[in-house]
Image (cartoon, coloured by chain):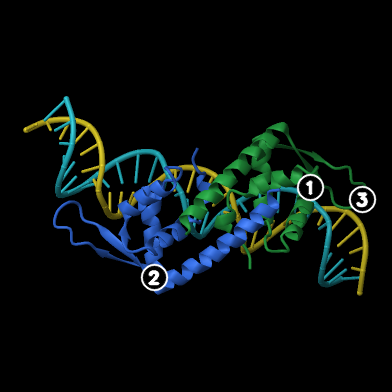
Chain colours: A green, B blue, C cyan, D yellow
Amino acid sequence: MSIASDVIRGHTEPIILSHLLEGDSYGYQINKEIMEKTNNLYELKEATLYTAFRRLEQAQLIISYWGDQEVGARRRYYSITDKGREAYREYKKDWENAKAIIDTLLK
Amino acid sequence: MSIASDVIRGHTEPIILSHLLEGDSYGYQINKEIMEKTNNLYELKEATLYTAFRRLEQAQLIISYWGDQEVGARRRYYSITDKGREAYREYKKDWENAKAIIDTLLK
DNA sequence: GTATATACCTCGCCTGTCAAGGTATATTTG
DNA sequence: CAAATATACCTTGACAGGCGAGGTATATAC
């Protein structure tokens, strides 16, 4: 059983930020690790992932740079910024609140 | 502090269904009671509410009928169907799963 | 040589939210 | 009594995020 995209909507960005808290990473890897973490219950779709990267970079919550692979496909790495860390803390608080509210309403 | 609509998105329908489990009700009342339950932290916007009613009725999860007010504005009452009760149980399971998944990813 | 894995990306559709606008009745307040 | 407020319903059109479908390129395995 999977997770509905309307429920996940709005969580894509914090999920990516959370991942980057553990260190720089790149799209393909992030996607794979998210699947592993959730035992394949949740998969970030590529189109969703890359559009989220664009939004996050635009908002200066992450920055990106090309890896120096001498072999294999090129990778674009992402790094979380201080602003990103701050935004993540906010997201988390919001999530805790939202959880409580929804739990109250879904009695 | 309020709740972001992207986080609540997808929960509108189960919230309405949950409310109707306690008995038939009408739009204005449902909206007011949701605000009260959450201490005004969450307010279903009218446009959102009424479009959700349409979807729910279309999907036969609720049915509607006009109240017989002899005074004051007319009211359209909604009643949850068996199909709606079943859908609600599913929604709830989904929510429990989604919560666990998101909590896993938002470490 | 064909399939699979790695790695990136964009376009355009779909769907749910909601600001803004509208209608009508009843009560309260200055 | 006029105006404001509360009750009660509704629709339209814009907007934003998710994602199916499509595309590019490199490396390995069979």
Residue A61 in view in this figure: no
- Residue B14, position as x, y percentages in the image: 46, 60
- Residue A63, position as x, y percentages in the image: 74, 36
Label 1: few (<14), some or many (≥20) within 10 Å? some
Label 2: state its secondary structure.
loop
Upstream in sequence: badge 3 or badge 1: 1
- Residue B4, position as x, y percentages in the image: 52, 44
Mark 1 vs mark 2, foreground winner is 2
Identify residue type, mark 2: Gln
Name the residue at 76% across, 50% down: A27
Residue A49 in view in this figure: yes
Mark 3 vs mark 2, foreground winner is 2
Identify residue type, mark 3: Val
CB under 8 Å between callouts 1 and 2? no
Q: Mark 3 points at which residue?
A: A71
- Residue B15, position as x, y percentages in the image: 44, 57
Q: Is residue D23 above or below residue D14?
A: below
Label 1: state its secondary structure.
strand
Q: Give the CA distance from mark 3 to mark 2.
A: 57 Å
Identify residue type, mark 1: Tyr
Dot 3: chain letter: A
Residues at marks 3 and 2 on the same chain: no
Q: Mark 1 points at which residue?
A: A26
* Image disc number at residue B72: none
Q: Give the CA distance from mark 1 to mark 2.
A: 45 Å
Q: Is residue B26 above or below residue A96?
A: below
Name the residue at 40% across, 59% down: B19
Mark 3 vs mark 1, foreground winner is 1
Q: Mark 2 points at which residue?
A: B60
Q: In the displayed structure, does residue A69 sit left or right of residue B16? A: right
